[in-house]
Amino acid sequence: MRLIVFKSPSWRNLVLWGILIFVLLAYRENVVSVFSSKLKPIYSANVNTNMIGLSFDISWGEETAEPILIILKQEGIKATFFLSSPWAAKHEALVQRMVADGHEIGSHGNHHIDLNTLGPAEIEKEIVSAQDVLEKLSGKKINLLRAPNGAYDNKLIQVSNRLGYRVIQWSVDSLDWKRPGPDAVVNNVLNGLRPGQGAKAGDIILFHASDSAPDTVKALPRVIQSLKAREYALVPVGELLQHASSTWPPESNIPKDR
């Protein structure tokens, strides 16, 4: 009978294994990114209510945000404003007005750059830098992030989740930034970019309150009134998520204790 003898690993092998483990731990987020291909941001929510999430991005401009706030107050609507921190720092009074009116503040980052082009440490710096400014100005905990230009990858979502954020995209795009005219903006939201894709329960609508989207001010009252007539309730994204049984796509779901 042949005996099998197991040799003790050499010191060289032990050193190599030690180096490998160190690299895996030090760069674990990059390593996970390679093998995790199914991380997604939240595009919409699965709900048993008539709620629709209403959101606005602001990265620059002086003219559009205040008229939108006036419209929302007149219509009795609360929304989520995703703010870039440099804009917020220059418009402290408007940020505080948003909070006083009951709107939710989310992060649109610090520099308006594609965060998926950065490494994990740089992504964290961008998110935390914006968070420090937004929380100081608003007095609120910031836990929703909309990446500039909607650009994301596994690294961004992993870092964001670790920092306590949920990354939010949208399922209904007004395309207001293209300046197609108020009628087109209204149609994009109510009827969709393709037939049957108009706003419905669980959707998240994307508008812009930057000066790059002047059509929004004229289109918004018609959108709100039409959705009200269809018995939908427009709410901040955070409120929509509180009533969600899950989010879409399924890869966007994270443990409840996060």
Image (cartoon, helix red, strand yellow):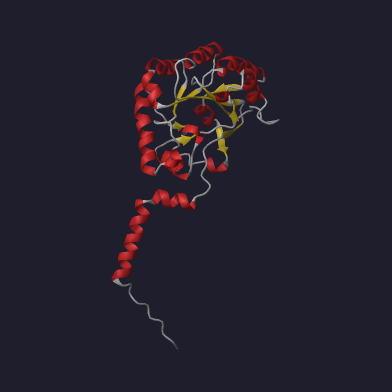
State which quadrant residue 216 falls in.
top right
Whether residue 134 sits left or right of residue 248 in the image: it is: left
Question: Where is 158 relative to 2, above or below?
Answer: above
Give the x, y percent position of residue 198: 66, 27
Looking at the image, which residue is at 34% across and 64% down? 17
Q: Depth check: 181 or 202 in front?
A: 181
Looking at the image, which residue is at 49% across and 28% down? 238
Looking at the image, which residue is at 44% across and 44% down? 155
Q: Depth check: 188 or 201 in front?
A: 188
State which quadrant residue 47 falls in.
top right
Give the x, y percent position of residue 183: 65, 18
Give the x, y percent position of residue 14: 31, 67
Placement of the N terminus among the 4 image quadrants: bottom left
Of all residues shown, which one is farthest toward the right? 195
Placement of the C terminus among the 4 image quadrants: top left
Whether residue 99 sits left or right of residue 9 in the image: it is: right
Can residue 40 be seen by looking at this rendering?
yes
Give the x, y percent position of residue 42: 53, 36
Question: Where is 148 relative to 208, above or below?
Answer: below
Can residue 258 be seen by looking at this rendering?
no
Count how many numbered circles sit on residues in the image. 0
Of all residues shown, which one is farthest toward the left? 11
